[in-house]
Amino acid sequence: MGAPKGNQFWKARAKHGRSKIFSSPNQLWNAACEYFQWVEDNPLKESKLVSFQGKSVTEELPLMRAMTIESLCLFLGVNARYLNEFESSLDMSKRQSKDFSSVIYNIKSIIRTQKFQGASAGLLNPNIIARDLGLIDKQDIDHKSTDGSMASDGLTKEERQARIQALLAKQK
């Protein structure tokens, strides 16, 4: 049986909806700083066999752990969509929205910088990080003709031969 028509039970609620996970930009920033520290304190481990004077020992070497938005979200107990909505939220006042937006921008910048510097120093795989950061080496190749009549330098076969002959004649 449903509630009677015209009821006002909703007014008796102490609050409406669930509580915000981060009620202030400072809370979000402090939680992100905890994640940054966790990444530093928990490097990945690589086992290596080391031999010296006939003795072989397995040693664990620390490897840099790359920061990601996804692992930050797992650490915070939210998803990436939550952060994106927070960044561009229209529900909050303009000032609070701006504050959250700048904190999220700073967090993303720190994560991007950490990955870029790690790859530059050879501590992270440069190919994977370049793809993740959207860094590409783009080369435009002009393929005007497939029959060899026009090369990428824009010269025909005859023009190229004439230039080669002229260069050879200068050398003599």
Image: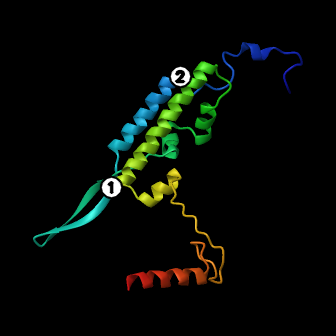
Q: Residue furthest right?
A: 5
- The crowding category of the residue bearing disc 1, from other C-alpha atoms within 10 Å (few below 14, some 14 to 19, many at least 20), is few
Quadrant occupied by the N terminus: top right
| Type of the residue with mark 2 | Ser
* Of the pair 27 and 136, the residue shown nearer to us: 136
Label 1 sits on residue: 45
Mark 1, secondary structure of its residue:
strand
* Of the pair 141 and 158, the residue shown nearer to us: 158
| Type of the residue with mark 1 | Lys
Q: Which mark is residue 61?
A: none
Occupied quadrant, residue 110? top left
- For the point 68% across and 24% down, the residue is 91
Residue contact at pointers 1 and 2, CB within 8 angstroms: no
Residue 32 location in percent, x, y? Answer: 45, 34
Q: Visible in this render: residue 166?
A: yes
Q: Which mark is residue 24?
A: 2
Q: Earlier in the sequence, mark 1 or mark 2?
A: 2
